[in-house]
Amino acid sequence: MKKFSLLFVLIFSLPFFIAGCTGKSEEKYNTYTLSCEYDEISHTLDGTESVEFYNKYDNSLSELKFFLYPNSFDEGKEAVSTSYFERAYPSGEESYGNIEIESVKSGNENLTFNISDEGNILTVTLLKEIYPNEKVCVDIDFTVNLANINHRLGYGDNTVNFGNFYPILCVYENGFVENDFATNGDPFYSETANYDVTLTFGKDFVLASSGDVLSESESGENKVVEIEANKVRDFAFTLSTKFQKVSSVVGDMTVNYYYYDEDNFEENLKVACDAMTTFQELFSKYPYKTINVAKTNFCFGGMEYPNLVFISDDVADAETYKYVIVHELAHQWWYSLVGNNEYAEAWLDESLTEYSTALFFERNEQYGISYDDLVAGALRSYQLFISVYKDILGDVDESMNRNLDEFNTEPEYVNCVYTKGVLMFDSIRKTLGDNKFFKCLENYFDEYEYKIATGEDLIESFSKNAKTNLEGFFKAWLNGEVVLDN
Protein backbone atom coordinates (compact mmCIF):
# COMPACT_ATOMS: atom_id res chain seq x y z
CA MET A 1 0.00 0.00 0.00
CA LYS A 2 1.07 3.55 -0.60
CA LYS A 3 -0.36 5.55 2.23
CA PHE A 4 2.29 8.17 1.57
CA SER A 5 4.54 8.21 -1.44
CA LEU A 6 8.10 9.25 -0.63
CA LEU A 7 7.56 12.38 -2.71
CA PHE A 8 4.42 13.10 -0.67
CA VAL A 9 6.41 12.67 2.53
CA LEU A 10 9.08 15.02 1.27
CA ILE A 11 6.56 17.64 0.26
CA PHE A 12 4.43 17.40 3.41
CA SER A 13 7.26 16.07 5.56
CA LEU A 14 5.63 15.49 8.59
CA PRO A 15 -15.18 -35.53 2.10
CA PHE A 16 -14.30 -33.90 2.23
CA PHE A 17 -12.04 -34.16 -0.84
CA ILE A 18 -13.06 -32.58 -4.15
CA ALA A 19 -16.82 -33.17 -3.81
CA GLY A 20 -18.82 -30.11 -4.85
CA CYS A 21 -15.79 -28.23 -6.18
CA THR A 22 -15.71 -26.43 -9.47
CA GLY A 23 -13.01 -24.40 -11.18
CA LYS A 24 -9.62 -25.11 -12.59
CA SER A 25 -6.97 -26.40 -10.24
CA GLU A 26 -3.23 -26.32 -10.66
CA GLU A 27 -1.19 -28.73 -8.60
CA LYS A 28 -0.20 -27.32 -5.22
CA TYR A 29 -2.15 -24.09 -5.72
CA ASN A 30 -5.41 -23.55 -3.88
CA THR A 31 -8.39 -22.57 -6.02
CA TYR A 32 -11.09 -20.02 -5.22
CA THR A 33 -14.33 -20.09 -7.20
CA LEU A 34 -16.31 -16.94 -6.47
CA SER A 35 -19.79 -15.93 -7.59
CA CYS A 36 -20.80 -12.48 -6.33
CA GLU A 37 -23.63 -10.03 -7.00
CA TYR A 38 -23.49 -6.37 -6.01
CA ASP A 39 -26.66 -4.47 -5.07
CA GLU A 40 -26.01 -0.75 -5.49
CA ILE A 41 -29.17 0.20 -3.58
CA SER A 42 -28.31 -1.64 -0.36
CA HIS A 43 -24.53 -1.46 -0.94
CA THR A 44 -24.21 -5.19 -0.30
CA LEU A 45 -22.36 -7.98 -2.06
CA ASP A 46 -23.86 -11.44 -1.86
CA GLY A 47 -21.23 -14.09 -2.49
CA THR A 48 -20.64 -17.79 -2.73
CA GLU A 49 -17.09 -19.02 -2.40
CA SER A 50 -15.83 -22.51 -3.10
CA VAL A 51 -12.29 -23.03 -1.82
CA GLU A 52 -10.30 -26.06 -2.88
CA PHE A 53 -7.52 -26.41 -0.33
CA TYR A 54 -4.48 -28.54 -1.05
CA ASN A 55 -2.60 -29.79 2.00
CA LYS A 56 1.02 -29.34 0.97
CA TYR A 57 2.23 -29.51 4.55
CA ASP A 58 3.81 -32.35 6.52
CA ASN A 59 1.00 -32.88 9.00
CA SER A 60 -2.72 -33.54 8.85
CA LEU A 61 -5.24 -30.74 9.40
CA SER A 62 -8.65 -30.87 11.05
CA GLU A 63 -9.59 -27.21 10.53
CA LEU A 64 -9.04 -24.30 8.18
CA LYS A 65 -8.79 -20.62 9.08
CA PHE A 66 -9.73 -17.60 7.00
CA PHE A 67 -8.97 -13.89 7.42
CA LEU A 68 -12.09 -11.67 7.42
CA TYR A 69 -10.85 -8.19 6.52
CA PRO A 70 -14.35 -6.66 5.97
CA ASN A 71 -14.96 -6.84 9.73
CA SER A 72 -12.28 -4.20 10.27
CA PHE A 73 -14.97 -1.69 9.21
CA ASP A 74 -17.49 -2.90 11.79
CA GLU A 75 -18.82 -0.72 14.58
CA GLY A 76 -16.34 -0.58 17.43
CA LYS A 77 -13.37 -1.00 15.11
CA GLU A 78 -10.98 1.75 14.02
CA ALA A 79 -10.96 1.67 10.23
CA VAL A 80 -8.69 4.73 9.96
CA SER A 81 -6.84 6.94 12.40
CA THR A 82 -8.52 10.20 13.39
CA SER A 83 -6.14 12.19 11.18
CA TYR A 84 -7.72 10.52 8.12
CA PHE A 85 -11.34 10.83 9.18
CA GLU A 86 -12.21 13.75 6.91
CA ARG A 87 -10.64 12.14 3.85
CA ALA A 88 -12.10 8.73 4.61
CA TYR A 89 -15.77 9.51 5.17
CA PRO A 90 -17.41 11.41 2.26
CA SER A 91 -20.63 12.02 4.22
CA GLY A 92 -18.69 13.48 7.13
CA GLU A 93 -20.04 10.80 9.43
CA GLU A 94 -18.53 7.47 10.41
CA SER A 95 -20.00 4.55 8.53
CA TYR A 96 -19.75 0.83 9.22
CA GLY A 97 -19.50 -2.39 7.25
CA ASN A 98 -18.82 -6.06 7.84
CA ILE A 99 -19.05 -9.58 6.45
CA GLU A 100 -21.77 -12.02 7.48
CA ILE A 101 -20.98 -15.73 7.15
CA GLU A 102 -24.28 -17.42 6.39
CA SER A 103 -23.21 -21.03 5.90
CA VAL A 104 -20.14 -23.22 5.51
CA LYS A 105 -20.37 -26.63 3.84
CA SER A 106 -18.31 -29.41 2.36
CA GLY A 107 -20.35 -31.09 -0.36
CA ASN A 108 -23.87 -31.23 1.11
CA GLU A 109 -22.67 -31.42 4.70
CA ASN A 110 -22.81 -28.42 7.02
CA LEU A 111 -19.54 -27.60 8.75
CA THR A 112 -19.12 -26.17 12.22
CA PHE A 113 -17.55 -22.72 12.19
CA ASN A 114 -16.89 -19.82 14.52
CA ILE A 115 -15.63 -16.25 14.25
CA SER A 116 -13.11 -14.83 16.69
CA ASP A 117 -14.21 -12.16 19.16
CA GLU A 118 -12.22 -9.56 17.23
CA GLY A 119 -13.98 -10.65 14.03
CA ASN A 120 -10.74 -11.19 12.13
CA ILE A 121 -10.61 -15.00 11.91
CA LEU A 122 -13.13 -17.55 10.64
CA THR A 123 -12.34 -21.07 11.88
CA VAL A 124 -13.92 -23.98 9.99
CA THR A 125 -13.90 -27.49 11.46
CA LEU A 126 -13.54 -30.13 8.76
CA LEU A 127 -15.58 -33.35 8.67
CA LYS A 128 -12.38 -35.39 8.72
CA GLU A 129 -8.68 -34.76 8.86
CA ILE A 130 -6.95 -34.14 5.59
CA TYR A 131 -3.51 -35.60 5.24
CA PRO A 132 -0.50 -34.35 3.26
CA ASN A 133 -1.17 -34.21 -0.50
CA GLU A 134 -4.93 -34.48 -0.02
CA LYS A 135 -7.53 -31.85 -0.94
CA VAL A 136 -10.75 -30.65 0.59
CA CYS A 137 -13.38 -28.27 -0.75
CA VAL A 138 -15.18 -25.80 1.50
CA ASP A 139 -18.17 -23.75 0.31
CA ILE A 140 -18.92 -20.45 2.07
CA ASP A 141 -22.00 -18.27 1.58
CA PHE A 142 -21.42 -14.71 2.73
CA THR A 143 -22.71 -11.15 2.51
CA VAL A 144 -20.49 -8.08 2.59
CA ASN A 145 -22.11 -4.89 3.88
CA LEU A 146 -20.15 -1.91 2.59
CA ALA A 147 -19.33 1.16 4.62
CA ASN A 148 -19.59 4.60 3.03
CA ILE A 149 -15.84 5.10 3.17
CA ASN A 150 -13.06 5.99 0.75
CA HIS A 151 -11.00 2.91 1.44
CA ARG A 152 -9.87 -0.45 0.04
CA LEU A 153 -13.36 -1.78 0.71
CA GLY A 154 -16.30 0.63 0.61
CA TYR A 155 -18.31 2.98 -1.57
CA GLY A 156 -17.59 6.62 -2.26
CA ASP A 157 -18.99 9.26 -4.58
CA ASN A 158 -17.14 7.95 -7.64
CA THR A 159 -16.17 4.31 -7.11
CA VAL A 160 -17.12 1.16 -5.24
CA ASN A 161 -13.95 -0.59 -4.09
CA PHE A 162 -13.72 -4.32 -3.41
CA GLY A 163 -10.29 -5.00 -1.98
CA ASN A 164 -9.86 -7.94 0.44
CA PHE A 165 -13.61 -8.51 0.39
CA TYR A 166 -13.91 -12.31 0.68
CA PRO A 167 -12.78 -14.88 3.25
CA ILE A 168 -9.18 -15.74 2.34
CA LEU A 169 -7.21 -18.66 3.72
CA CYS A 170 -4.70 -17.83 6.42
CA VAL A 171 -1.16 -18.91 5.59
CA TYR A 172 -0.02 -22.05 7.40
CA GLU A 173 3.33 -21.97 9.23
CA ASN A 174 3.26 -24.81 11.77
CA GLY A 175 -0.20 -23.43 12.50
CA PHE A 176 -2.35 -20.85 10.75
CA VAL A 177 -1.06 -17.26 10.99
CA GLU A 178 -3.81 -15.08 12.45
CA ASN A 179 -3.03 -11.44 11.72
CA ASP A 180 -4.89 -8.68 13.53
CA PHE A 181 -6.54 -5.65 11.96
CA ALA A 182 -4.40 -2.50 11.77
CA THR A 183 -4.85 1.11 10.66
CA ASN A 184 -1.15 1.38 9.74
CA GLY A 185 -0.10 -0.36 6.56
CA ASP A 186 -1.56 -3.52 5.06
CA PRO A 187 -2.43 -6.33 7.51
CA PHE A 188 -2.41 -8.98 4.78
CA TYR A 189 -0.67 -12.28 4.20
CA SER A 190 -1.73 -14.73 1.50
CA GLU A 191 -0.45 -17.42 -0.80
CA THR A 192 -0.55 -17.59 -4.57
CA ALA A 193 -3.78 -19.23 -5.76
CA ASN A 194 -6.02 -19.65 -8.80
CA TYR A 195 -9.30 -17.77 -9.12
CA ASP A 196 -12.44 -18.32 -11.20
CA VAL A 197 -14.79 -15.40 -10.58
CA THR A 198 -18.28 -14.46 -11.77
CA LEU A 199 -19.40 -10.92 -10.95
CA THR A 200 -22.90 -9.52 -11.39
CA PHE A 201 -23.57 -5.79 -11.08
CA GLY A 202 -25.62 -2.96 -12.58
CA LYS A 203 -25.08 -2.53 -16.31
CA ASP A 204 -24.16 1.16 -15.92
CA PHE A 205 -20.99 0.21 -14.05
CA VAL A 206 -17.57 -0.18 -15.65
CA LEU A 207 -15.34 -2.84 -14.07
CA ALA A 208 -11.59 -2.87 -13.39
CA SER A 209 -10.33 -6.06 -11.78
CA SER A 210 -7.58 -8.54 -11.19
CA GLY A 211 -7.23 -11.30 -13.77
CA ASP A 212 -8.47 -11.55 -17.34
CA VAL A 213 -12.08 -11.07 -18.43
CA LEU A 214 -13.27 -14.20 -20.27
CA SER A 215 -16.79 -13.05 -21.09
CA GLU A 216 -19.26 -10.24 -20.47
CA SER A 217 -23.01 -10.39 -21.01
CA GLU A 218 -26.18 -8.64 -19.91
CA SER A 219 -28.98 -10.15 -17.85
CA GLY A 220 -31.88 -7.74 -17.42
CA GLU A 221 -30.49 -4.65 -15.73
CA ASN A 222 -27.20 -6.31 -14.86
CA LYS A 223 -23.89 -7.20 -16.41
CA VAL A 224 -22.44 -10.64 -15.79
CA VAL A 225 -18.66 -10.88 -16.11
CA GLU A 226 -16.57 -14.04 -15.94
CA ILE A 227 -12.92 -13.62 -14.92
CA GLU A 228 -9.97 -15.94 -14.64
CA ALA A 229 -6.94 -15.07 -12.51
CA ASN A 230 -4.32 -17.78 -12.27
CA LYS A 231 -1.31 -17.77 -9.94
CA VAL A 232 -2.15 -14.51 -8.15
CA ARG A 233 -1.78 -13.45 -4.53
CA ASP A 234 -5.43 -12.37 -4.14
CA PHE A 235 -8.32 -10.91 -6.14
CA ALA A 236 -9.85 -7.41 -6.14
CA PHE A 237 -12.04 -5.19 -8.28
CA THR A 238 -13.56 -1.73 -8.45
CA LEU A 239 -16.73 -0.40 -10.09
CA SER A 240 -17.69 3.05 -11.33
CA THR A 241 -20.38 4.56 -13.52
CA LYS A 242 -17.89 7.34 -14.33
CA PHE A 243 -14.93 5.29 -15.54
CA GLN A 244 -13.39 6.02 -18.91
CA LYS A 245 -10.56 3.84 -20.16
CA VAL A 246 -7.45 4.33 -22.25
CA SER A 247 -5.09 1.51 -23.14
CA SER A 248 -1.65 0.86 -24.52
CA VAL A 249 0.41 -2.23 -25.29
CA VAL A 250 3.78 -2.93 -23.68
CA GLY A 251 5.31 -6.01 -25.30
CA ASP A 252 2.59 -8.66 -25.07
CA MET A 253 0.85 -6.95 -22.13
CA THR A 254 -2.05 -4.48 -22.18
CA VAL A 255 -1.90 -1.53 -19.79
CA ASN A 256 -5.31 -0.02 -19.00
CA TYR A 257 -5.90 3.27 -17.19
CA TYR A 258 -9.39 3.89 -15.74
CA TYR A 259 -10.12 7.50 -14.87
CA TYR A 260 -12.72 10.22 -14.41
CA ASP A 261 -12.64 14.01 -14.15
CA GLU A 262 -9.16 14.56 -15.58
CA ASP A 263 -7.50 15.92 -18.71
CA ASN A 264 -4.02 14.40 -18.38
CA PHE A 265 -5.09 10.76 -18.64
CA GLU A 266 -2.67 10.13 -21.50
CA GLU A 267 0.24 11.25 -19.30
CA ASN A 268 -0.84 8.92 -16.50
CA LEU A 269 -1.18 6.02 -18.92
CA LYS A 270 2.30 6.81 -20.22
CA VAL A 271 3.90 6.71 -16.76
CA ALA A 272 2.18 3.37 -16.10
CA CYS A 273 3.61 1.96 -19.34
CA ASP A 274 7.06 3.33 -18.56
CA ALA A 275 6.91 1.83 -15.08
CA MET A 276 5.98 -1.63 -16.35
CA THR A 277 8.75 -1.44 -18.96
CA THR A 278 11.36 -0.32 -16.43
CA PHE A 279 10.51 -2.88 -13.76
CA GLN A 280 10.56 -5.69 -16.30
CA GLU A 281 14.06 -4.58 -17.28
CA LEU A 282 15.17 -4.34 -13.65
CA PHE A 283 13.58 -7.45 -12.12
CA SER A 284 11.79 -9.86 -14.43
CA LYS A 285 9.21 -10.14 -17.18
CA TYR A 286 5.65 -9.52 -15.97
CA PRO A 287 3.92 -12.90 -16.30
CA TYR A 288 0.36 -11.67 -16.82
CA LYS A 289 -1.48 -10.32 -19.87
CA THR A 290 -3.03 -7.25 -18.27
CA ILE A 291 -2.33 -4.54 -15.70
CA ASN A 292 -5.10 -2.17 -14.67
CA VAL A 293 -4.49 1.22 -13.06
CA ALA A 294 -7.69 2.69 -11.63
CA LYS A 295 -8.37 6.10 -10.13
CA THR A 296 -10.58 5.52 -7.08
CA ASN A 297 -12.03 7.11 -3.99
CA PHE A 298 -9.29 6.29 -1.50
CA CYS A 299 -8.14 8.17 1.59
CA PHE A 300 -4.51 7.12 1.20
CA GLY A 301 -2.23 7.43 -1.83
CA GLY A 302 -2.93 4.05 -3.41
CA MET A 303 -3.24 0.31 -2.98
CA GLU A 304 -1.86 -2.70 -4.80
CA TYR A 305 -3.52 -5.91 -5.95
CA PRO A 306 -2.50 -8.45 -8.59
CA ASN A 307 -3.10 -6.94 -12.06
CA LEU A 308 -4.86 -3.98 -10.42
CA VAL A 309 -3.82 -0.89 -8.47
CA PHE A 310 -5.95 1.84 -6.89
CA ILE A 311 -4.72 5.44 -7.21
CA SER A 312 -6.43 7.96 -4.95
CA ASP A 313 -8.34 10.80 -6.56
CA ASP A 314 -7.42 12.77 -3.43
CA VAL A 315 -3.84 13.15 -4.71
CA ALA A 316 -4.17 16.55 -6.37
CA ASP A 317 -0.56 17.21 -7.31
CA ALA A 318 0.16 15.78 -10.79
CA GLU A 319 3.78 14.87 -10.00
CA THR A 320 2.84 13.09 -6.78
CA TYR A 321 0.03 11.26 -8.61
CA LYS A 322 2.54 9.87 -11.11
CA TYR A 323 4.85 8.90 -8.24
CA VAL A 324 2.06 6.92 -6.61
CA ILE A 325 1.32 5.11 -9.89
CA VAL A 326 4.97 4.04 -10.11
CA HIS A 327 5.09 2.88 -6.50
CA GLU A 328 1.91 0.82 -6.75
CA LEU A 329 3.09 -0.84 -9.95
CA ALA A 330 6.41 -1.76 -8.32
CA HIS A 331 4.29 -3.74 -5.86
CA GLN A 332 3.42 -6.08 -8.71
CA TRP A 333 6.89 -7.52 -8.13
CA TRP A 334 7.28 -6.90 -4.37
CA TYR A 335 4.14 -8.25 -2.70
CA SER A 336 2.17 -9.69 -5.61
CA LEU A 337 4.76 -11.97 -7.23
CA VAL A 338 7.15 -12.22 -4.27
CA GLY A 339 4.88 -12.43 -1.26
CA ASN A 340 5.51 -11.75 2.41
CA ASN A 341 3.73 -11.27 5.71
CA GLU A 342 2.90 -7.57 5.39
CA TYR A 343 1.66 -7.40 8.98
CA ALA A 344 4.85 -8.75 10.55
CA GLU A 345 7.44 -7.46 8.06
CA ALA A 346 6.00 -4.43 6.30
CA TRP A 347 9.49 -3.24 5.41
CA LEU A 348 10.13 -6.27 3.22
CA ASP A 349 7.75 -5.23 0.45
CA GLU A 350 7.28 -1.51 1.22
CA SER A 351 10.96 -0.55 1.61
CA LEU A 352 11.92 -2.44 -1.53
CA THR A 353 8.95 -1.01 -3.43
CA GLU A 354 9.75 2.53 -2.38
CA TYR A 355 13.38 2.06 -3.39
CA SER A 356 12.25 0.56 -6.71
CA THR A 357 10.27 3.75 -7.27
CA ALA A 358 13.45 5.77 -6.85
CA LEU A 359 15.15 3.44 -9.34
CA PHE A 360 12.40 4.17 -11.84
CA PHE A 361 13.08 7.90 -11.73
CA GLU A 362 16.82 7.28 -11.97
CA ARG A 363 16.17 5.45 -15.25
CA ASN A 364 13.49 7.84 -16.53
CA GLU A 365 15.01 11.29 -16.33
CA GLN A 366 12.25 12.73 -18.54
CA TYR A 367 10.05 12.97 -15.43
CA GLY A 368 12.40 15.49 -13.84
CA ILE A 369 12.74 13.71 -10.50
CA SER A 370 16.35 13.05 -9.54
CA TYR A 371 17.34 9.83 -7.80
CA ASP A 372 20.02 11.69 -5.84
CA ASP A 373 17.49 14.32 -4.78
CA LEU A 374 15.05 11.61 -3.64
CA VAL A 375 17.70 9.93 -1.49
CA ALA A 376 18.94 13.24 -0.09
CA GLY A 377 15.35 14.29 0.58
CA ALA A 378 14.66 10.98 2.33
CA LEU A 379 17.61 11.60 4.63
CA ARG A 380 16.40 15.13 5.46
CA SER A 381 12.87 13.87 6.06
CA TYR A 382 14.07 11.09 8.34
CA GLN A 383 16.39 13.38 10.30
CA LEU A 384 13.56 15.88 10.77
CA PHE A 385 11.27 13.10 12.00
CA ILE A 386 13.89 11.96 14.55
CA SER A 387 14.56 15.50 15.70
CA VAL A 388 10.89 16.35 16.23
CA TYR A 389 10.07 13.06 17.95
CA LYS A 390 13.03 13.32 20.30
CA ASP A 391 12.01 16.84 21.24
CA ILE A 392 8.48 15.64 22.01
CA LEU A 393 9.06 12.15 23.42
CA GLY A 394 12.70 12.24 24.47
CA ASP A 395 13.39 9.11 22.45
CA VAL A 396 12.10 7.25 19.41
CA ASP A 397 12.12 3.64 18.29
CA GLU A 398 13.99 3.58 14.96
CA SER A 399 13.63 -0.14 14.28
CA MET A 400 12.07 -1.14 10.98
CA ASN A 401 11.27 -4.79 11.71
CA ARG A 402 8.07 -4.52 13.78
CA ASN A 403 4.48 -5.67 13.58
CA LEU A 404 2.13 -3.02 12.25
CA ASP A 405 0.51 -2.50 15.65
CA GLU A 406 3.92 -1.79 17.19
CA PHE A 407 4.31 1.49 15.31
CA ASN A 408 2.96 4.14 17.63
CA THR A 409 1.95 6.69 14.99
CA GLU A 410 1.49 7.01 11.25
CA PRO A 411 4.61 9.22 10.83
CA GLU A 412 6.68 6.64 12.73
CA TYR A 413 5.46 3.88 10.42
CA VAL A 414 6.04 5.92 7.25
CA ASN A 415 9.51 7.10 8.19
CA CYS A 416 10.78 3.78 9.51
CA VAL A 417 9.34 1.63 6.72
CA TYR A 418 9.27 3.82 3.60
CA THR A 419 11.76 6.63 4.07
CA LYS A 420 14.40 4.68 5.97
CA GLY A 421 13.92 1.78 3.56
CA VAL A 422 15.11 3.94 0.68
CA LEU A 423 18.21 4.89 2.66
CA MET A 424 18.91 1.26 3.58
CA PHE A 425 18.78 -0.06 0.01
CA ASP A 426 20.74 2.91 -1.29
CA SER A 427 23.43 2.14 1.28
CA ILE A 428 23.50 -1.55 0.33
CA ARG A 429 23.77 -0.64 -3.35
CA LYS A 430 26.72 1.68 -2.69
CA THR A 431 28.41 -1.03 -0.62
CA LEU A 432 28.01 -3.80 -3.21
CA GLY A 433 28.26 -1.74 -6.40
CA ASP A 434 25.65 -1.74 -9.15
CA ASN A 435 26.54 -5.05 -10.78
CA LYS A 436 26.26 -7.09 -7.61
CA PHE A 437 23.29 -5.16 -6.25
CA PHE A 438 21.08 -5.56 -9.30
CA LYS A 439 22.10 -9.19 -9.68
CA CYS A 440 21.03 -9.74 -6.08
CA LEU A 441 17.61 -8.22 -6.81
CA GLU A 442 17.12 -10.39 -9.89
CA ASN A 443 18.15 -13.56 -8.09
CA TYR A 444 15.99 -12.79 -5.04
CA PHE A 445 13.00 -12.35 -7.33
CA ASP A 446 13.76 -15.52 -9.29
CA GLU A 447 14.11 -17.54 -6.11
CA TYR A 448 10.81 -16.42 -4.55
CA GLU A 449 8.50 -15.70 -7.48
CA TYR A 450 4.96 -16.91 -6.58
CA LYS A 451 6.29 -17.89 -3.14
CA ILE A 452 6.51 -16.28 0.28
CA ALA A 453 9.75 -14.68 1.43
CA THR A 454 10.85 -13.52 4.86
CA GLY A 455 13.38 -10.88 5.82
CA GLU A 456 15.82 -13.68 6.61
CA ASP A 457 15.28 -15.06 3.12
CA LEU A 458 16.15 -11.72 1.53
CA ILE A 459 19.28 -11.34 3.66
CA GLU A 460 20.38 -14.90 2.86
CA SER A 461 19.67 -14.45 -0.85
CA PHE A 462 21.59 -11.16 -1.05
CA SER A 463 24.50 -12.62 0.96
CA LYS A 464 24.70 -15.71 -1.23
CA ASN A 465 24.62 -13.80 -4.52
CA ALA A 466 26.92 -11.01 -3.33
CA LYS A 467 29.27 -13.63 -1.90
CA THR A 468 29.42 -11.46 1.22
CA ASN A 469 27.80 -12.00 4.61
CA LEU A 470 25.33 -9.11 4.80
CA GLU A 471 23.45 -10.20 7.91
CA GLY A 472 25.13 -7.69 10.21
CA PHE A 473 24.67 -4.94 7.64
CA PHE A 474 20.92 -5.53 7.25
CA LYS A 475 20.30 -6.16 10.94
CA ALA A 476 21.97 -2.87 11.91
CA TRP A 477 19.46 -1.02 9.74
CA LEU A 478 16.45 -3.12 10.70
CA ASN A 479 17.14 -2.99 14.43
CA GLY A 480 17.67 0.78 14.46
CA GLU A 481 21.39 0.67 15.17
CA VAL A 482 22.42 2.78 12.17
CA VAL A 483 22.67 6.40 13.30
CA LEU A 484 21.12 8.90 10.88
CA ASP A 485 20.79 11.90 13.20
CA ASN A 486 22.05 15.31 12.14
Image: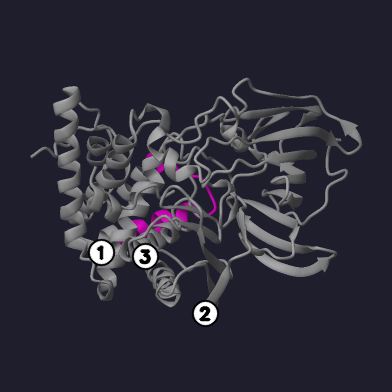
Residue 72 point in image, percent of width and height = 56, 33
Residue 240 point in image, percent of width and height = 61, 61
Q: Residue at x 56, y 54 (%)?
A: 157
Residue 231 is left or right of residue 320, and the answer is right
Q: Give the quarter of the figure containing the C terminus.
A: top left
Q: Which residues are magenta?
A: 438-457
Question: In the rendering, which numbered label is found on residue 435?
Answer: 1
Q: Residue at x 81, y 63 (%)?
A: 221
Amino acid at dot 1? Asn
What kind of secondary structure does the magenta stretch mostly adopt? helix
Residue 398 is left or right of residue 160, and the answer is left
Q: Is residue 390 above or below residue 168?
A: above
SS state under label 1: helix
Mark closest to the chain's N terminus, 2 or 3? 2
Q: Is residue 317 above or below residue 4?
A: below
Is 441 one of the magenta-colored residues? yes
Amino acid at dot 2? Val
Q: Residue at x 56, y 24 (%)?
A: 76
Q: Is residue 134 visible?
A: no
Q: Residues within 10 Å of mark 1 (few under 14, many from 20)?
A: few
Mark closest to the chain's N terminus, 1 or 2? 2
Front disc: 2 or 3: 3
The foreground one among 356 and 440 is 356
Residue 365 point in image, percent of width and height = 25, 73
Front disc: 1 or 2: 2
Q: Is residue 250 above or below residue 63?
A: below
Q: Residues within 10 Å of mark 3 (few under 14, many from 20)?
A: many
* Residue at numbered disc 2: 249
* Residue at numbered disc 3: 322
